[in-house]
Image (spheres, helix red, strand yellow):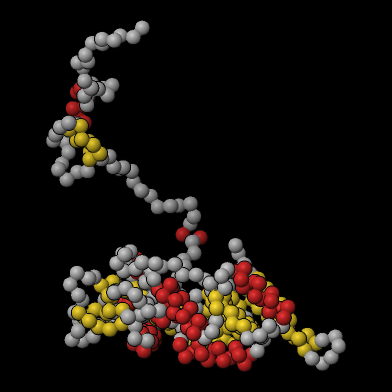
């Protein structure tokens, strides 16, 4: 049976109705028990409840003894500019930074200007690396200037940032084609690839630590080209490389925009695969490949690695085998893939 005219409710719940006595509540919740600076978890009328903090004593982890731990080091690589200046190899790190700054000046990466009103200058930092080879030769000291791109704001400092890279399947297909048609496979590397991209946005950066120009301490660097760390740096590099390849008469494939092809005849062609700053050049005619290398070196700072040996964990080795019917030799390609997918 339903009561269509219920009596009005006069008793309202209050903070003390927690199955305890009023005296107990007053012992824990009073106006004087909480300082103005204490953290609270709630406000019940005129009373505030203090945040409960653990008073348990924290003990060190004792599951393993101290001699069972392994300490990993960074191999002598400074974490910041201050550490580099306090390192015993200070002079070598300074030389590495001088080389990096010279590369930036030669590439006209930035110019010193006064910061316009309403604009902010991005911070930067130095990254230090020791480059060693497997044969244990003398390590090479490398310093690179990185912009703190995580402080960039979309719509102001950047817009589109997508940049394609060659697909692994494309690499496998071209290597198989080279093996079956006995093609030459050459490899090149682009030095400071991201520094070649032209910026479309107006971006300012603070002067690098240790290289603040005297008399212009209040000036900032107006970036004219991309720099490592910028969100749009990979995309701007690809757009610049794509433009150069089109000027050389190459066309990119529709299925993979990092595969560029130029066809001279049915049996004479060149295929170029681009993975960020690493590229493979495949073709019948070695002289045409060398000609392409020279043209690319005019636009970018390139390093010729000669016959391809490795790309993306794929080790390439060429074995010369005599033909069964003569003294000619045919290059066959044996590929070893160390791919972890």
Farthest-out residue, right:
325
All told, the count of numbered labels is: 0
- Judged left or right of residue 117, residue 153 is right
- Judged left or right of residue 155, residue 294 is right
Quarter the N terminus occupies = top left
Q: Is residue 121 visible?
A: yes
- Provide residue 320's location: percent of width, then percent of height: 75, 86
Vertical side of 300 occupied by 341: above or below: above
> 317 or 139: which is nearer to us?
317
The residue shown at (21%, 24%) is: 14
Vertical side of 37 occupied by 274: above or below: below
Vertical side of 95 occupied by 333: above or below: above
Q: Is residue 128 visible?
A: no
Farthest-out residue, front:
265
Q: Residue 16 lies in what quarter of the image?
A: top left
Quarter the C terminus occupies = bottom right
Farthest-out residue, top:
1
The residue shown at (48%, 78%) is: 242
- Judged left or right of residue 20, residue 254 is right
The residue shown at (61%, 78%) is: 310
The residue shown at (22%, 26%) is: 15
């Amino acid at each position: 049976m339903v009561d269509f005219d219920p009596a009005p409710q006069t008793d309202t719940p209050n903070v003390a109705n927690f199955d305890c006595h009023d005296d107990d509540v007053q012992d824990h919740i009073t106006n004087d028990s909480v300082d103005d600076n204490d953290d609270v978890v709630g406000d019940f009328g005129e009373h505030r409840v203090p945040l409960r903090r653990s008073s348990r004593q924290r003990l060190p982890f004792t599951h393993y003894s101290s001699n069972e731990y392994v300490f990993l080091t960074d191999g002598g690589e400074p974490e910041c500019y201050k550490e580099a200046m306090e390192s015993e190899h200070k002079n070598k790190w300074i030389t590495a930074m001088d080389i990096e700054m010279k590369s930036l000046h030669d590439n006209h990466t930035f110019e010193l200007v006064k910061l316009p009103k309403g604009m902010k200058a991005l911070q930067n930092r130095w990254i230090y690396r020791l480059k060693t080879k497997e044969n244990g030769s003398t390590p090479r000291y490398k310093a690179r200037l990185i912009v703190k791109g995580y402080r960039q704001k979309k719509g102001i400092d950047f817009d589109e940032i997508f940049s394609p890279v060659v697909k692994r399947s494309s690499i496998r297909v071209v290597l198989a084609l080279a093996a079956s048609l006995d093609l030459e496979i050459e490899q090149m590397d682009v030095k400071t690839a991201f520094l070649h991209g032209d910026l479309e946005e107006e971006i300012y950066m603070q002067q690098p630590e240790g290289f603040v120009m005297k008399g212009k301490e209040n000036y900032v660097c107006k970036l004219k080209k991309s720099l490592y760390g910028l969100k749009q740096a990979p995309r701007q590099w690809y757009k610049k490389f794509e433009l150069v390849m089109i000027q050389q008469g190459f066309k990119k494939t529709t299925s993979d925009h990092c595969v560029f092809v130029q066809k001279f005849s049915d049996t004479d062609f060149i295929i170029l695969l681009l993975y960020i700053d690493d590229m493979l050049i495949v073709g019948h005619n070695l002289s045409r490949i060398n000609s392409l290398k020279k043209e690319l070196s005019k636009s970018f700072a390139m390093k010729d690695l000669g016959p391809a040996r490795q790309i993306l964990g794929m080790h390439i080795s060429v074995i010369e085998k005599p033909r069964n019917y003569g003294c000619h030799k045919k290059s066959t390609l044996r590929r070893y893939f160390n791919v972890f997918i």
